[in-house]
Amino acid sequence: MSDHMQEEELFQEPAPSLTKNDQFAAVLVIALAVGSVLLGLLIRQRDQGRTWLYVNQQAGIQASYPAGWLVDERGSYLVRIRDPRARPFKTQYLITIIPVGSQSTIRNILDNLTLQRSIDLSAYRVLSVDEVARGGTNLTRMSFAFVDADPNPFIQRLPVVVLGTDTVILDGNRAIVVTYMAEQSSFEANQAAFDRFLASLQY
Amino acid sequence: MTTNLYDTTSATFQRRYRLLATVIFLLATLTLVSSAIAQNNTGAILTAQRASVFLTQTYDVAGSQTLSCVGSGTLISATGLILTNAHLAGTSGPCRGERIVVALPVRLDEPPVPTYVAEVVQSDPQLDLAILQITGALDGSLIDPQTLNLPFVSIGDSSRLLPGNSLTFVGYPDIGSTSVTSIEGLITSITTEKSGSRLAWFRTDAALGGGMSGGGAYDTNGLLVGIPTSAPATAGTEAGPMCLSIQDNTRDGVINDRDACVPIGGPVTAVRPIFFALPLIESAKNGFILRHASGIPSITPSAPPTFTRPFFSTGVSDFGVPTRIVSTLPSGVSSLFFFFDYDNMQTGIPYEVRVTKDGLDMPQFSLGPLAWGGGRKGTWYVGTENVIWPDGNYEFTLLLNGQPVAASSISIGGTSSEPAFSDLTFGIPSSSGDFLSTGTLLPALVTQLDARFSFEGMQDGQDWTEVWYLDGTEVFRTTRLWDQGESGQATVSAINYQGLPLGTYRLELYIGQRLAATGDVTLAGNRSSQEESLIFSNPCMVSDITRDGLPATQCSSVMPLGISSLYAFVDWDLMPNGIPWTYRWFLDGRLVASSTQLWDAGGVGQRFWVSLSANKPLPEGSYAVEVVVGNRPMFSLNATIGSGTQPISGIPEEANEVRISGTVVDALTGEGIPGALVAVLDVALESPQFTWNESEIMTQAITDREGRFVLPRGLTRGNYYTVYVFAEGYTTIVEDNFTVFRNQPSPAEIVIEMGHP
């Protein structure tokens, strides 16, 4: 065994010593790699934080929403903005304008929403109604949940539990209801982005 | 010389090379073409499987849903129209039900999943065909058919099919516990039956379970060309009960013979050609409703059915008259028909003609069990042509609900033949003895009705009998000795110098005691200038009627757009009750609706009407209505709605679209990506112009847990589209040149691979 090792040592070439240029090159490569990763993260973060502006001049409403989300103005809402990449449920923000009479209360508005959604959505449940602060004023926010299922019988999409909130802003003779809906496991993670959207809302 | 030799060799070599290359090219082309066809056919059958539904009829017993009948059906439109057997969808009869549950093959390798309820929108019990419409979900909520996006099959041409052609049958062989099934088979013969004349049924050698009834038969192009049909007996049969008890209806804790039994039936061998279903399909797609003025309600029979006068004929005329009645036949006969009279029959009751030869079953000549659709009373026939009947002693047994009710036998073999009368024809004679008009519908009040027939093998001195009936009552009988020689033509007459009363006449001719010829003829209407029956007069088309059933508008052949009904009014004279009559509506020359009824409005009257209506405006086009009695068109009326140039909506649009479904998978693992969004932009909109507004998206779908998606709207052939595919954790796909070729089969399956960023 010992002889064998000696033979191996005999055939080994002496390790070449690194020149200063080699050492500089190695450090430079490592630094570039780290720098690239950091730059990539920076760009990604910037991209993720990038927003586009939604403007509806007729309703006098504008808000900044995450870039790359889809805008839809064809429903019963003023606008629905949703993340096409989100899975399994498309995280979305809705802005709905509801006329308000002089006798109406916020509770009436929320009750009407509940009545309609009980028909339109499966297993719709109101979870809570509380107050939240926005720009120094308190707004009413209703939390709810429902089950989203695909009606196509040939599509085996599992029903998804969706959490949502309705934030009601009274604006003269109209109520602006800003709705946020996301799949329950990603609801908390996306809450901050929605808060930024809500904060950007101008009317 | 050498050069010449070399040149010759070279030329030969080149020729051989070219020949070889040509052969290789042809073989390669053939292989590619056959491979493409095979792939296309496989795709078409896959589509047929996806469009195959399992139907369950249920009714409520003390709050419990009880199954009464099961069978198959086929989706023929994306909006949930289902083609099936009428007996599977009836509200009365052996398959009675209150609710039709539709189960879909959500996964082709799994049993169907009950998903929807459906209602009958068109039904023809005579043909045992019906069209259902999906109307709601199982929980009772209503569904807008326009929001459904179901797979469906294309309709083929059954008139081109011949014995020896291949068919693929798709349906559910048992009571829904297995997945959708495809079975290959051949058309072995074509059966003639009174329900559908010469092409009434295709016969097949495929082993189809009873549950396949109502499903689909597809040609080699994957087009729907027939409906396998069987109506199993609900009572016990000779072989025991043909049904299964699968529910504890009595709630006694056990499932036994006291619980309801779901009939499943034996093998299905009869296939109704799709040709018969086309008017029903057209009516259903356009929402047409057929109505006519009501007369005296018919009486539901209470007495048990009876069967009389079974006999055999070697053929049947276009008027349904046996051409040559026989009791024995020589070897090599290729055509044989079994006739019988019936009374008190009920629509939907399972009937069967079972044929045995020397005691052995002959399924290729048997028919049924099928749902009865021939009405209460009449003469029926079943036969097979263009097939050699082997020598032997044949027994034809008629079974009703599994029980034998009548039988008759005939011997085939040898060379001997018996004296015969044949080709019986009724007519009104002229003074010279020629027929002024012939057929089974002739004018009433004529003084003489002749029946002409051929004879052969007769011997002078042979006794023969002539018997006339009027509306079932014998009115004349005479027996004489034959004196007209061995062969030739002879005539017998019914004469009444006061005028023969209207009604249905039957003539029976006997040689000795054996029935040798028979036929029915109806005398109705006045004599027209062509000496034919003139029953109807003063036809008139209007778009509305009053509450009293009178025309509410002026007669016109040009109608405005937006009307939802057409009424054809007519006066009638000398039309006896009980006569079958048919009215047919045509749109742009195509038969879109047809109904056969028994006349019940009495002998004389005015302003009888038939109508075509819909719950929406009738499509623009050229309409025609035709009334037929005794195979003879009585009158026709035309009307145009609008300019009459617009095609019927729906069908051309579907034909020009390709339905897209597919799977989004991970490029590395090949696993499906759930929750991905597949979006197709409007035509001619490319990614640089896309403003991320959903109004610019033509259609979109989200993938299921296996990555599968179905685009709700079809893509138009010959167009380019931009497709986006989004999924969290994957690089978004943008394809600006997604081409839908003009010859692209529909539906099309695509696979989209997504990579990680």
Image (cartoon, coloured by chain):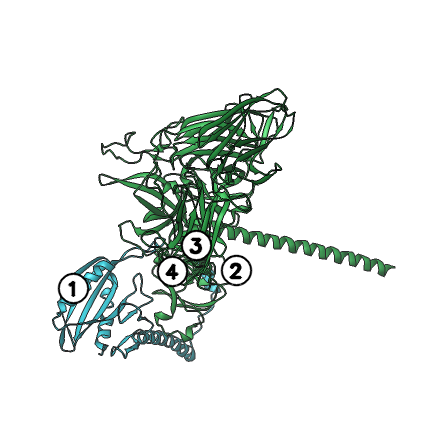
Residue at coordinates 59% horizontally, 39% vertically from top-left?
B430
Q: Chain A is drawn in which colour?
A: cyan
Q: Which residue lies furthest to the right in this view?
A: B1
On the image, the x and y values in percent for residue B718 come to: 50, 65
Residue B395 can be seen, yes or no = no
- State the mark number for residue A111: 1
Residue type, mark 2 in image: Asn
Where does residue B235 sit, x and y in percent of width and height?
Answer: 35, 30
Tell me whether circle 1 and circle 3 mark residues in contact (CB < 8 Å).
Answer: no
| Amino acid type indicated by mark 4 | Ile
Colour representing chain B: green
Nearer-the-camera pick, B426 or B422: B426
Q: x, y (%) of residue B450? A: 56, 34
Contact between marks 1 and 2 (CB within 8 A): the answer is no
Q: Do the residues labelled 4 and 2 touch (CB within 8 Å)?
A: no
Q: In which quarter of the image is residue A15?
A: bottom left
User: Which residue in the protein does label 4 denote?
Assistant: B563
Which subunit holds the residue at mark 2?
B
The chain that hosts pointer 4 is B
Residue B536 image label? none
**Numbered label attached to residue B540:** 3
- Work out whether disc 3 and disc 4 sit on a shared chain: yes
* Residue B364 to residue B634: above or below: above
Q: What element carries label 4?
A: loop
From the image, state whether disc 4 or disc 2 is nearer to you.
4
Task: Evaluate if marks 3 and 2 touch, with contact meaning CB atoms under 8 Å apart.
Answer: no
Residue beneath label 2, please?
Answer: B743
Cα–Cα gap, marks 3 and 4: 17 Å
Q: Is mark 3 on a helix, strand or loop?
A: strand
